[in-house]
Image (cartoon, helix red, strand yellow):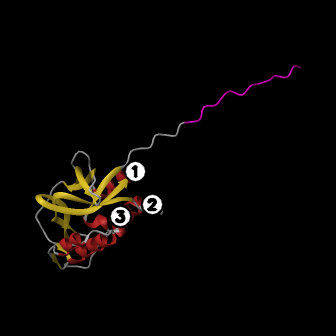
């Protein structure tokens, strides 16, 4: 029997799969607080501290969890809001959107709103923020909720004028102990949070 000689075929290195694009999400309000964001996203990459010109922080509608108005950004020429830019993968953005009730058709509690923000070095960056679909009546934040937002702003290193602006927001005492977590929210958190 004659032995068969085989020549290995040349192999071409396999191309790395294309990296899915990331999104810059301008985080403000409670999403500045690591306790709030880690339930939703683990530890998102922080790209920069940034400011959004011609908007102000407003509180509208009502949160049963905090007995408080809920933050959103309201157009106001000459004003500015400071926050951080989270650089999110498509999966992280989907997870966070699901938690916030974002629907791309505008039918959810919030929707993506494209803006240009300015980072601490003066660079203009394209970003999204979560904007309330229906504002609801203007209502002050509860003291506990505003303190939670302030804790996040301080942790993230927002500049002193941004902290002072938050401290100046009117706040009221909640009518019951907060945060009030119901079982549906706890179940959703366990499904959406990842094991970090």
Tag 2 near tag 1, CB within 8 Å = no
| Residue beneath the point at 36% across and 69% down | 35
Q: Which residues are magenta?
A: 1-14
125 vs 83, nearest the viewer:
125
Q: Residue furthest right?
A: 1
Q: Residues within 10 Å of mark 3 (few under 14, many from 20)?
A: some
- Which residue has dot 1 on it? 91
As drawn, is 2 to the left or to the right of 161? Answer: right
Q: Quadrant of the N terminus?
A: top right
109 vs 2, nearest the viewer:
2
Q: Can residue 108 be seen in this snapshot?
A: no
Residue 4 is covered by the magenta coloring: yes
Q: Nearer the viewer, mark 3 or mark 2?
A: 3
Sequence order check: which comes first, mark 3 or mark 2? 3
Q: CA distance from mark 3 to mark 2?
A: 12 Å
Res 81 quadrant in image:
bottom left
- Label 1's element? helix
Q: Position of residue 188 (x, y in %)?
A: 36, 61
- Which residue has dot 2 on it? 194
As drawn, is 102 to the left or to the right of 87? Answer: left
Sequence order check: which comes first, mark 2 or mark 1? 1
Q: CA distance from mark 3 to mark 1?
A: 15 Å
Number of the label disc, if any, that sits on residue 37: 3
- Label 2's element? loop
Q: Can residue 24 be seen in this snapshot?
A: yes
How many marks overall?
A: 3
| Residue beneath the point at 24% across and 77% down | 144
| Residue beneath the point at 30% across and 74% down | 151
Q: Residue furthest top?
A: 2
Q: CA distance from mark 2 to mark 1?
A: 12 Å
């Amino acid at each position: 029997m004659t032995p068969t000689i085989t020549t290995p075929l040349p192999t071409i290195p396999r191309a790395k799969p294309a990296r899915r694009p990331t999104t810059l999400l301008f985080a403000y309000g409670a999403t500045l607080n690591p306790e709030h964001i880690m339930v939703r996203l683990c530890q998102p990459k922080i790209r920069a501290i940034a400011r959004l010109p011609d908007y102000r922080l407003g509180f509208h509608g009502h949160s049963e969890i905090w007995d408080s108005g809920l933050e959103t950004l309201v157009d106001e020429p000459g004003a500015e809001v400071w926050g951080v830019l989270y650089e999110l993968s498509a999966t992280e953005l989907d997870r966070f959107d699901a938690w916030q009730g974002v629907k791309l058709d505008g039918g959810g509690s919030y929707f993506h709103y494209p803006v240009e923000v300015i980072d601490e070095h003066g660079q203009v960056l394209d970003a999204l923020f979560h904007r309330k679909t229906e504002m609801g009546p203007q209502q002050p934040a509860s003291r506990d909720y505003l303190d939670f937002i302030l804790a996040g702003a301080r942790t993230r290193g927002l500049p002193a004028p941004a902290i002072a602006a938050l401290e100046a927001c009117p706040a009221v005492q909640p009518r019951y102990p907060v945060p009030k977590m119901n079982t549906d929210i706890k179940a959703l958190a366990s499904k959406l949070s990842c094991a970090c």
